Image (cartoon, rainbow, N blue to C red):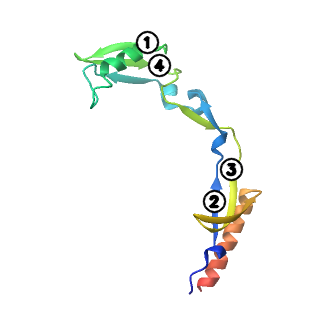
Amino acid sequence: MQPLSPRLMRTYSIIADKRGQRPASCAEVDCVNWRNGWITAIDPSWRNGDGTVTGEHQLAYLRADDRPHTEQTRGDVVVEFVYPPGVDCFHRHVTTDDRPELYVRRRGVPGRLTDPYIHRTPEDWAEDLAENQEKLDRLVD
């Protein structure tokens, strides 16, 4: 069988619009730390490789933060910050604005795609993909 010209090939993709992403609260994304609470443990004697970040810096940051927590010492060194359920964590969550994905068929191969066609529904896209696979199966047989 001769290789197909890239212009005869089809590439199928599902594209999510990243512009539809926005910052989200822990409650919106059902964050496990927000739901269950969490503990952050800091060793004040810790230093990163170049000494620009230290355990003392981390302690100062957490102590200045206004999130409700309790502080306890474990052993002689480690300080634990205990955050109860319902407190937003430190992670920057994102969510989508519920914009629908785009179900796209293009002619060509990645890097040389042309003639985009956007299907109206995921079912139409899946049917087109299946029909294309059947055509390929017939060519191979």
Mark 4–mark 1 Cα distance, whole angstroms, equals 17 Å
Mark 2–mark 1 Cα distance, whole angstroms, equals 47 Å
Q: Position of residue 39 (x, y in %)?
A: 39, 23
Which mark lies nearer to you, 4 or 1?
A: 1
Q: Is the C-beta separation of discs 3 and 2 under 8 Å?
A: no
Which mark lies nearer to you, 4 or 3?
A: 3
Q: Amino acid at mark 3?
A: Glu
Mark 3–mark 1 Cα distance, whole angstroms, equals 42 Å
**Given the current orientation, which residue lies at the most extreme left position?**
76
Secondary structure type for disc 3 = loop
Q: Which residue is mark 1?
A: 64
**Given the current orientation, which residue lies at the most extreme right position?**
120
Image-quadrant location for residue 43? top left
Q: Which residue is mark 2?
A: 13
Image-quadrant location for residue 27? top right
Q: Which residue is mark 4?
A: 84
Q: What residue is at 77 percent from the left and 57 percent from the top?
A: 120
Image: 65 above or below 114: above
Q: What residue is at 46 percent from the left and 15 percent from the top?
A: 65
Q: Amino acid at mark 1?
A: Ala
Q: Which residue is mark 3?
A: 101
Disc 1 residue crowd, few under 14, some 14–19, many 20+, Cα 10 Å: few
Which mark lies nearer to you, 3 or 1?
A: 1
